[in-house]
Image (cartoon, grey):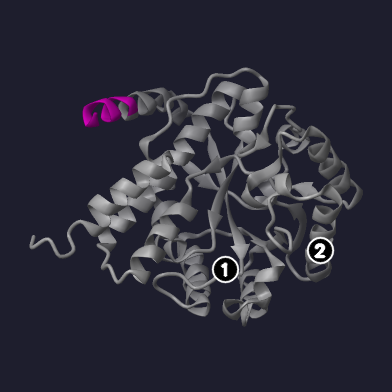
């Protein structure tokens, strides 16, 4: 089984290899701001470390998508100041709803009212951009009428879809660290760093290959990340690895200026996930082999084996 998985991973890399000659650009975006405490830092510590890490990495502008309900939670205390600190460091903020609902479980009118509630807090603030990112990347699922109601509603409000083109499921790895911390399990930080980098780089490589097959070019990518302790710890390392691979880190403003992607409204049976994936589905493009790290089951297994396995085994 393991040899088969390694063979599939090698095949995926071979497919992605010819893309290296093209200019590759990617913007970094962070969801669920302000997020609750993680396994290693308080929210204030994390924000300070993340700002410093982005500065160290030479990232001129990232985008932070704000879920305003989080400001009212215990961990949200001081969230407004942390958001202002991100903007003061050169980053921008955008709308991620007030309540972080699934659209496919919510009536369109209530969902739009929830967006308006977040917009009322965001509008007029320094660094604000009129972008809305769907929580869970759920744009209506199988309900085309609801999908279209949201598309019309966003346009009427002067909001653009804050779409994603690349995703490495960083939220799952963060959840694993929180569970380990809760259960009193020590973590091997070097192995955790490696798994974080593998999962994010693997997700980017997969979506870049998919974009090439779908669009015939390397578009300016938008990477989905979350405001996590793992980002605070390893984002500078991720940026360094991306640059080694020939990527240029661009601003979210630059990424969202791509006319083709900005105008895309895929008509697919289930509207959710990355824009790259939905456009490929609409055009009948077969996806490349997925990297191992994109499976949450595989990531959980690797976390258990690599990040936790050395603890208490006498080795």
Foreground of the two, 202 or 259: 202
- The residue to which callout 1 is attached is 35
State how far apart marks 1 and 2 are (Cα).
Answer: 18 Å
Numbered disc 2: secondary structure: helix
Residue pictured at 37% horizontal, 70% vertical: 182
In the image: residue 216, left or right of residue 146: left
Q: Position of residue 296 (x, y in %)?
A: 42, 44
Where does the magenta region start and end?
A: 1-8
Above or below for 49 versus 152: below
Q: Is residue 97 above or below residue 102?
A: below
Residue 312 screen position, x and y as percent: 15, 65
Q: Is residue 72 left or right of residue 49?
A: right
Residue hosting label 2: 119
Q: Residue at x 27, y 64 (%)?
A: 187
- Above or below for 187 versus 74: above
Labels 1 and 2 touching (C-beta < 8 A): no
Q: Residue at x 84, y 68 (%)?
A: 120
The image quadrant of residue 15 is: top left
Where the C terminus falls, by quadrant?
A: bottom left
- Measured from the top left, where is residue 277 in percent x and y? 60, 31
């Amino acid at each position: 089984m393991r040899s088969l998985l390694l063979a599939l991973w090698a095949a995926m890399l071979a497919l992605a290899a010819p893309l290296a000659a093209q200019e590759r650009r990617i913007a970094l975006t962070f969801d669920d701001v302000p997020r609750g405490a993680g396994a290693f830092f308080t929210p204030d510590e994390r924000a300070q470390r993340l700002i410093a890490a982005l500065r160290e990495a030479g990232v001129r502008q990232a985008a932070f998508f704000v879920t305003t309900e989080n400001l009212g939670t215990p961990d949200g205390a001081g969230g407004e100041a942390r958001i202002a600190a991100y903007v003061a460091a050169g980053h921008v903020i955008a709308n991620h709803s007030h309540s972080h609902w699934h659209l496919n479980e919510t009536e369109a009118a209530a969902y739009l009212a929830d967006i308006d509630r977040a917009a009322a807090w965001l509008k007029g603030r320094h660094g604000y951009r009129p972008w809305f990112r769907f929580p869970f990347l759920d744009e209506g699922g199988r309900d085309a009428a609801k999908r279209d109601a949201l598309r019309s509603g966003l346009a009427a409000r002067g909001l653009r879809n804050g779409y994603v083109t690349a995703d490495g499921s960083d939220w799952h790895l963060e959840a694993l660290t929180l569970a380990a911390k809760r259960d009193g399990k020590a973590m091997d930080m070097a192995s955790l760093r490696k798994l974080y980098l593998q999962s994010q780089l693997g997700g980017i490589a997969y979506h870049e290959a998919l974009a090439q097959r779908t669009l015939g070019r390397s578009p300016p990518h938008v990477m989905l990340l979350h405001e996590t302790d793992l980002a605070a710890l390893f984002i500078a390392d991720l940026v360094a690895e991306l640059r080694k691979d020939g990527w240029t880190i661009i601003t979210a403003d630059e990424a969202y200026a791509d006319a083709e992607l900005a105008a895309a409204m895929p008509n697919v049976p289930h509207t959710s996930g990355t824009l790259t994936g939905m456009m490929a589905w609409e055009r009948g493009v077969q996806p490349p082999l997925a990297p191992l790290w994109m499976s949450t089951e595989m990531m959980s297994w690797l976390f258990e084996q690599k990040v936790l396995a050395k603890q208490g085994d006498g080795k």
